[in-house]
Image: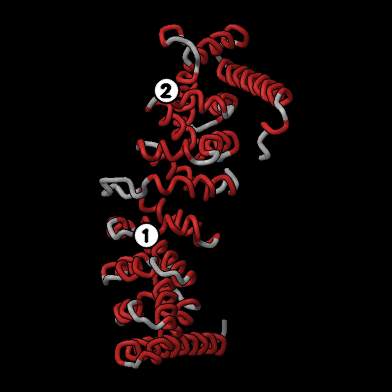
């Protein structure tokens, strides 16, 4: 490379660095100005500043979010949440939401600065847009582990349950996700939701794809609820409650099937006499048999235990699922040898499951054919 080319490259680098420094200086100046407008401006100026913060953050990196927080914009934005002015609340909600996205430090700062109580108050509003923006903000903040116990203790959960029944589709998704986030908080001494959440969760599970991430969160909450008597009663009282869990066992993802079978097992273990027939009536056996072969290890164990509880034989005479598997494995060993025994046993069990499902379906069709039209459910 010649001297002229080296000088030209050096000049380009210097020019590029100067442009970057100038850009950073302009942005820092803009951040300081926004902070000053929020802290000392009138309400109109504050609303405009909050909107400008949202615009700036949406087009910038996480570093800009951190710099805005360091410049002191969080506290005045939280004060704006308390304003009776709709535009002030709306603008501050969007600004805080965008400051928190993809920035764990800001999430914690916003909660530490006292954002949760005014957000909970906004959840009580009849105005759907503000209420659901508040839910979206709480969702973002609940993703940070230190924030979970604070949000869980704030009284937000019952208000989020209301959104499950009356909110928009996005509002319902956000509410379920928040409740799921909070349910994983180890510091919660009591369940984050009560039996009132069961019916809307069942309805949402009916409507969604059973293998979706949404279904995984909904079934996780239903499994938690099935551990209380109130939750179990609510599941059985909900229209299609047990059937929906059975359908999730059949059609769900690995995660949702694990939670769904866990909920059914919780019902049956709490009172076999009460719940056994209710679960059998919804045709649970084929899905449970398949789960003993295709589910996660936890789902397989749960399915085996539930199948043992559902069998109509005395405990001392009952052939457990694990015993059945050992018998099949021994047969496979004799047929194909120990090297291929596991693969052969799995195939034999799958064939048994398939045959059981076919027999169950034939039985259901036979019963349906013998019913009068008025007795056949429309759905």
Residue in front for this viewpoint, 258 or 81: 81
User: In percent of the image, x 46 and y 54: which residue is there?
Assistant: 176
N-term-proximal mark, 2 vs 1: 1
Q: Quadrant of the C terminus?
A: top right
Give the residue number, with chain letter if any, for mark 1: 142
Which sits in the foreground, 111 or 218?
A: 218
In this rendering, is residue 118 above or below 329? Answer: below
Question: Which residue is under mark 2?
Answer: 272
Callout 2: SS: helix
State the image coordinates of residue 174 (x, y, percent, origin top left).
Answer: 47, 59
The answer to which image quadrant residue 102 occupies is: bottom left
Q: Residue at x 51, y 38 (%)?
A: 241
* Residue 25 x, y percent position in the rendering: 39, 89
x, y percent for residue 153: 27, 57
Which label sits on residue 304? Answer: none
In the shown orientation, is residue 10 left or right of residue 96? right
SS at circle 1: helix
């Amino acid at each position: 490379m010649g001297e002229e080319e080296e000088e030209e490259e050096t000049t380009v680098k210097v020019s590029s660095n100067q442009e970057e420094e100038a850009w950073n200086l302009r942005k820092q100046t803009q951040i300081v100005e926004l902070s000053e407008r929020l802290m000392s401006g009138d309400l109109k100026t504050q609303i405009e500043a909050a909107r400008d913060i949202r615009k700036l953050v949406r087009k910038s990196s996480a570093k800009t979010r951190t710099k805005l927080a360091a410049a002191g914009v969080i506290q005045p934005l939280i004060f704006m949440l308390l304003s009776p002015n709709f535009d002030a609340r709306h603008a501050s909600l969007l600004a805080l939401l965008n400051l928190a996205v993809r920035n764990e430090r800001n999430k914690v700062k916003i909660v530490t600065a006292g954002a949760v109580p005014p957000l909970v108050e906004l959840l009580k509003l009849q105005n759907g847009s503000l209420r659901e923006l508040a839910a979206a903000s709480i969702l973002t903040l609940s993703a940070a582990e230190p924030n979970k116990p604070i949000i869980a203790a704030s009284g937000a959960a019952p208000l989020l349950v209301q959104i499950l029944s009356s909110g928009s589709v996005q509002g319902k998704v956000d509410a379920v996700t928040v409740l799921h986030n909070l349910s994983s908080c180890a510091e919660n001494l009591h369940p984050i939701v009560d039996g009132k959440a069961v019916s809307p969760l069942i309805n949402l599970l009916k409507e969604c794809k059973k293998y979706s991430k949404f279904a995984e969160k909904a079934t996780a909450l239903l499994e938690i609820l099935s551990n209380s008597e109130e939750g179990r009663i609510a599941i059985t009282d909900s229209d299609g409650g047990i059937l929906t869990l059975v359908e999730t066992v059949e059609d769900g993802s690995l995660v949702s099937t694990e939670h769904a079978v866990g909920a059914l097992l919780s019902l049956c273990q709490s009172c076999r006499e009460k719940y056994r027939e209710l679960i059998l009536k919804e045709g649970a056996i084929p899905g449970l048999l398949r789960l003993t072969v295709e589910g996660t290890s936890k789902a397989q164990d749960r399915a085996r235990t539930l199948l043992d509880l559902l069998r109509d034989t005395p405990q001392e005479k009952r052939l457990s699922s694990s015993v059945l598997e050992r018998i099949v494995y021994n047969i496979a060993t004799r047929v194909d040898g120990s090297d291929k025994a596991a693969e052969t046993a799995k195939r034999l069990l799958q064939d048994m499951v398939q045959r059981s499902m076919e027999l169950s379906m034939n039985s259901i069709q036979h019963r349906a054919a013998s019913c009068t039209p008025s007795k056949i459910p429309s759905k």
